[in-house]
Image: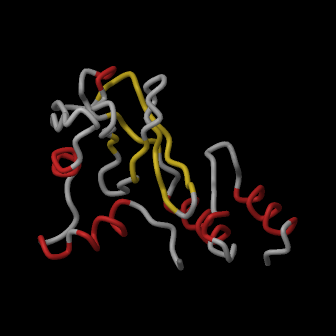
Amino acid sequence: MTQIHHWQSYFGVLDATHGGTRTLEQHAERHPNGMLDASPPAPGVHAKTKTIARVSGSCWIADCPKAGCGGAEFVNFDDPRFFCCSCRNVDFAGQPIAVKLPSDKQREQIEEQLLKRPDPITRHWYPDETVADLKAENLKEGVL
C-alpha cells in the first residue's frame, strides 16, 4: 500500500463508474446500521461537537464521539463532516459533526513519515503526536 487512504481514495475507486465519489448523504443511505436504519443526516452541522482526524492502519479516519458507540468513518478532506453510520449521530440531533483536520502541510509530513513504514498495519498517527514523534518512532524501529 503506497498511500494513506481517505474518503476520496477509497470511495473514489468504488464510485468511479457512477461519476465520482459519493457524498456524505449518499454514503449514509448506502450504509444502514445493524437495525437497518438508513436515516439521512439532518441538515446543518452540530455546533457543539467535533471529532478529530487520525490515521489507523494506513487510513485517515474519525471516531464517533458518542459514548459507547465505537463507530468510525473515513475522513473526507473535501467535506470535513462526520456522520456515523452505526449510531446515525443520534446524540447530535442526527446532524453531521465537524472534523478537525491537520493542515495540508502537516498532513503531508505525517503521511511522508508513515509511508516509510513497510507494514501498512503499523501506520498510525494520533492528534497529540508531532511529526518529530513519528520520526523518532521510525528511528527506534530502524525505519529510515
Indicate the position of residue 89 as horizontal and vertical percent values: 31, 29
Indicate the position of residue 46 as horizontal and vertical percent values: 30, 26
Height in image: 135 above or below 133?
Answer: below
Quarter of the image with the C terminus is bottom right
Q: How many marks?
A: 0
Residue drawn at x 20%, y 59% is 22
Indicate the position of residue 13 as horizontal and vertical percent values: 28, 74
Q: How is the image coloured?
A: secondary structure
Residue drawn at x 35%, y 60% is 7
Indicate the position of residue 96 as horizontal and vertical percent values: 28, 35
Height in image: 47 above or below 53?
Answer: above
Residue drawn at x 46%, y 29% is 65
Q: Is residue 90 left or right of residue 48?
A: left
As rendered, which of 139 and 107 lies closer to the eye? 139
Q: Is residue 138 left or right of residue 47?
A: right
Identity of the residue furthest to the left in this view: 18
Identity of the residue furthest to the front in this view: 35
Residue drawn at x 77%, y 55% is 133
Q: Is residue 6 left or right of residue 140?
A: left
